Amino acid sequence: MSLRKFITNKTTAALAVLITVFANTSVFAQDAAAGAAAAPKVDMGEVYKSVIFYILVFLAICLFIAIVGKAIRVYELSREAQGKPVGINWNRVNSSLFALFLVLGLYGVYWEYTVHGSMLLPDAASVHGKRIDDMFNLTLIITTIVFIATHILLFGFSYIYKYSAKRKAYYYPHNNTIEKIWTIVPALVLTVLVLMGFLTWRSIFYKVEDPKNMPIQIEMTSEQFKWTIRYPGADGIVGHKNYKLTTASNALGIDFKDLKSRDDQMADEMVIPVDKPIKLILTSKDVIHSFYMPHFRVQLNTVPGMQTVFEFTPTKTTTQMQQETNDPNFKFLFYCAKICGSGHYNMQKVVRVVSMAEYKTWLAEQKTYLNDDLRKEFNLPVAPAPVKSVSDTTATDSAAVKTNQMALNK
Ligand SMILES: [Cu+2]
């Protein structure tokens, strides 16, 4: 059997299979129609959800393209047989498609920047965030220029230098000047970007602390699937913790033998004063999570068995941000940015940036981790009974409130 005959046989066989499939489907369709007539409640919307429907649509499109292709081929062969010049100049068709693609593509870039550009995050609300945004913008401008220039060249050349019987290709194998330009220019641009990135990174992570403006420590502990916030209390230092001390009443495993732990406070939300450095101490109880505060351009992994630290200074209060974004419901949030399990989506909490005075008032109201049960557990003297009729707060709370106020007033 000759190859041609073999291929023809194969094609016939394939067509036969296709026809059988379609014939069967139509039989099914008739059955279904009959069924539908008997029970008028069949939901036709279901048909469009089935995989088979989309496979059939795909096959129909393929068949349509194949038929158009064959028709064009027949047209060309008939012209050839009549000795007429070739009907369709495919080089011109392809090159025009390239040109069209370039125009559509560039419009797509413009559309992306103008429509989706506004969906980027608002201006950074922290000191170092401004530097990160500047770097991001500079990188975006440079890459956009390069992207547009190279694509105009790529598609433009394909259009301009399409095959023509009137001219011959010029053999041009090498040019040192061009080689130098396209090696040195990207190398310089990349060096500048990498150096800027390095210096920005260093300014964020290796800054020298100002003894007159020491950061406020806040410890964040991640676990599946929540965050626990610990404020340092009056001494300004979060105390030791040890996972071996973890009990039902001491979920963080705080070591209350450490004096620095005794005044540590718990909080439901993260409240921080504006224009004051904040030192985040990030830890994890189970797997790796990622602490992420997009508006402050803060993101760092929390790793079980070690502490990671990120220092930043918020520059805008929540109220200010609500005015800037024209959204009275605007809230700063922090999230987990590492897919850590089924409840990952739920790992977010509110961050409230307020004035120093508001912060002090709020902090004074937060409870300490140490309570009477834990005092017993750690063999610590239980605090004296509260003075009657003074307030409803417990002795521990009012003691903590007092020490905090004393410390903040210093
Ligand atoms: Cu997560």
Image (cartoon, grey):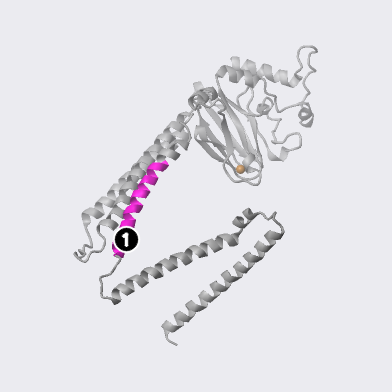
Q: Is residue 342 left or right of residue 102?
A: right
| In the image, residue 40 lies in the stretch drawn in magenta | no
From the image, tell me which residue sits under label 1. 93
Which kind of residue does numbered mark 1 sit on? Val
Q: Position of residue 161 (x, y in %)?
A: 25, 59
Q: Is residue 367 left or right of residue 54?
A: right
In this rendering, is residue 240 above or below 101?
above
* Secondary-structure class at tag 1: helix
Q: Residue lying furthest top in this view? A: 389
Q: Is residue 191 above or below residue 260?
A: below
Q: Residue at x 26, y 72 (%)?
A: 84
Residue toward you, 214 or 78: 78
- In the image, what residue occupies the spot 25% across and 56% down? 160
Write the residue at 69% across / 40% down. Answer: 243
Magenta residues? 89-112
Q: Toward which corner of the image does residue 328 lie, by quadrant? A: top right
Residue 274, position in %: x, y? 52, 23
| Residue under the point 28% across and 47% down | 185
Evaluate whether residue 174 shows in this view: yes
> Where residue 91 sits: x, y (%)?
29, 63
Main SS category, magenta section: helix
Ligand 1 resides in the quarter of the picture at top right
Asked whether 379 or 73 is in front, the reply is: 73
In this rendering, the count of numbered labels is: 1
If the image is split into quadrants, where does the C terminus sit? Answer: top right
